[in-house]
């Protein structure tokens, strides 16, 4: 008799992308770009929500009611969806009434702060921070020979 007990395998980590769609119809398939990679669904959902919130605010004009803001967004705005998230993905349709009726705070609109493209630290940034193996990237504190010269402006 053989033991057929299987060892459970850890679930493969899902990498998420957010698809940005142009509602004005300026592009043939309405897809502007796909942003990613998000390593968890909550981050992708937060990015999509903030992106749409910002798009709606850019369509808001002073004195416009919720209906006018919605019409402007549907004509000129951008929508976002989390690709392959199914029912767990954030949907703009669920919050459009609230978004158009109530102006957003700057924090609610700040999709740039959570954009995964900005969260990547590349080799150039690491070298500027002095965290790579090259010791000659930052000036030494022991002498002033490697500091830039100050121009004579006065």
Image (spheres, rainbow, N blue to C red):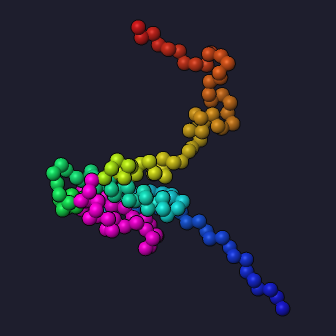
User: Which one is nearer the viewer's eye here, 136 or 71?
Assistant: 71
Q: Quadrant of residue 25?
A: bottom left
Q: In which quarter of the image is the N terminus?
A: bottom right
User: Which one is nearer the viewer's eye here, 25 or 122?
Assistant: 122
Which x, y percent locates residue 23? 28, 61
The residue at 51%/48% (across/down) is 119
Q: What stretch is highlighted in magenta?
A: 74-103
| Vertical comparison of 33 with 113: above or below | below
Q: Does the magenta stretch include residue 96?
A: yes
Q: Residue furthest bottom?
A: 1
The residue at 75%/83% (across/down) is 5
Q: Does the magenta stretch include residue 37?
A: no
The answer to whether any part of residue 134 appears in the image is yes
The answer to whether any part of residue 29 appears in the image is no
Which x, y percent locates residue 127? 60, 36
The residue at 15%/51% (across/down) is 63
Please tell me how many numbered marks the rendered image carries: 0
Q: Residue furthest top?
A: 154
Q: Quadrant of residue 8?
A: bottom right
Which x, y percent locates residue 12? 61, 68
Is 4 situated left or right of 82 in this image? right
| Vertical comparison of 139 with 51: above or below | above
The residue at 22%/52% (across/down) is 60
Q: Quadrant of residue 30?
A: bottom left
Is 118 situated left or right of 143 in this image? left
Is 10 situated left or right of 42 in this image? right
Q: In which quarter of the image is the C terminus?
A: top left
């Amino acid at each position: 008799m053989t033991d057929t007990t299987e060892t459970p395998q850890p679930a493969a980590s899902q990498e998420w992308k957010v698809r940005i769609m142009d509602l004005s119809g300026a592009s043939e398939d309405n897809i502007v770009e796909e942003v990613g990679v998000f390593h968890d669904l909550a981050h992708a959902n937060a990015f999509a929500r903030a992106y749409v919130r910002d798009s709606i605010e850019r369509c808001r004009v002073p004195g416009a009611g919720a209906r006018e803001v919605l019409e402007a967004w549907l004509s000129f705005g951008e929508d976002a969806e989390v690709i392959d998230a199914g029912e767990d993905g954030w949907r703009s349709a669920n919050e459009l009434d609230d978004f158009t009726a109530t102006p957003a705070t700057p924090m609610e609109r700040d999709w740039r702060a959570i954009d995964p493209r900005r969260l990547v630290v590349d080799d150039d940034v690491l070298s500027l921070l002095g965290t790579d193996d090259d010791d000659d990237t930052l000036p030494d504190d022991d002498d002033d020979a490697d500091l830039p010269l100050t121009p004579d402006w006065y």
